[in-house]
Image (cartoon, rainbow, N blue to C red):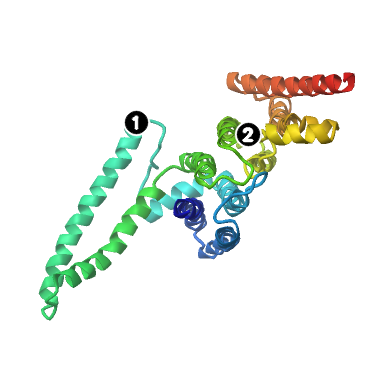
Amino acid sequence: MLIKFLCAVVTRALFILISLIGVWRVTWVKNNNLYWFLTILYLPLVVELILTLRRRKGKDYKWFSPAIFLFLVSIIPTIWILELHHQHNKSTDAKLLILTFGLFQCGRLDSSESIKSLFSELRNSTNTTAAYKASLDCKTSLHIHSCNSEGLLKCKTILLLLPKFLSDSKQLLSSVCANDWMLALHQILLILLIVGKWLMPIGEGVTRDELSQLLLIFVGTAADILEFTSETLSDVKDNSPQLVYIILAVWTWSMLQFPFHLSVVNSKADDECESQDNTFLTRHRTDFWTGVETLFIQDGPFLVVRLTVMIHFDIIHQMLVFFTIKNLLMVTLNVYRMWVIFHDYRSI
């Protein structure tokens, strides 16, 4: 019971932490502290945690996950603001780095050398902080003669050191390029959705086998969504700012696959319903919802957007053509499968 409580609390805490980092990034790029009011969106998640712990002992629901849904509600507005800001203020972001930290080039995360460079900056920052701590120790020991407690002296030193450490960490995070920052946020969001669902206590009526199938589906879905946002946005950002809104809307719509677990396989329930009711939706509920998700939530909308990019904006390259064909095959195969299932049902 204690482990379930801890898993439920830790999962929501990670959700809030990532959302908080996103809000901090918004306040920094917008240079407006009013955006901290976005943290109000965390309140429903906190209320959901309290209710889940009290009424369900931390257990999630079978077909729907309120925690994941509320996490998306809290972080999706942040990602929209960052994406749109970066679209309209590319030159301003570079000037902000120069004015704030004196950096003429942002740090990239696309190679091992650039990542090592960032970590070396972090080590240099740590060494600077250590030197700053040593100087504080000397100053504090000179000025605090009445303090006989070594522990109290250390506490005061740490309190004086904390702003320096936070400032160095802020500079390191802010020095990352906007494109790499957004890509990292998308990646962490998708990974956290999968890991969070795995950590949350299993809902009633869901077996471990069904949970493992759902997590495998999540992994494939996350990979497709990440590829869609990263590749398609980079293709159209300079050609059509209006299409950026459409792509973000399709991305938001596709993220609904994570809180709704309609494609969870439940063979026992299907067998019981099969003996009581012989309708098409009852016998093939799982296949039906899997087809609906593919046609109307993921591959169908992705196909429409990619065809628009290729036909209307005349943007064609190897990866775009490959994933367009992949989406077309997924839509075609799902339509064919639905037709086969319906035909077999009618022939019974």
Name the residue beneath numbered marker 2: 236
- The answer for how far apart the CA atoms under marks 2 and 1 are is 28 Å
- Residue 55 appears in the picture as rendered: yes
Dot 2 surroundings within 10 Å: few (below 14), some, or many (20 or more)?
some
- Placement of 254 over or under 167, stated as above or below: above
Residue marked by disc 1:
112
Looking at the image, can residue 296 be seen? no
| Mark 2 element type | helix
Left or right, 324 with reference to 123:
right
Q: Which mark is residue 245?
A: none
Residue 38: name its quadrant: bottom right
Left or right relative to 237: residue 102: left
Looking at the image, is 43 positioned above or below residue 263? Answer: below
Labelled pair 2, 1 in contact (Cβ < 8 Å):
no
Q: How many marks?
A: 2
Between circles 2 and 1, the one closer to the viewer is 1
Left or right, 8 with reference to 323: left
Q: Position of residue 297 (x, y in %)?
A: 71, 36
Callout 1 crowding tier (Cα within 10 Å): few <14, some 14–19, many ≥20:
few
Q: Which secondary structure, mark 1?
A: helix
Residue 43 position within the rendered picture, expressed as x and y whole percent measured from the top left: 57, 63
Q: Amino acid at mark 1?
A: Ser
Q: Quadrant of residue 284?
A: top right
Q: Position of residue 69 (x, y in %)?
A: 63, 50
Front one among 24 and 151: 151
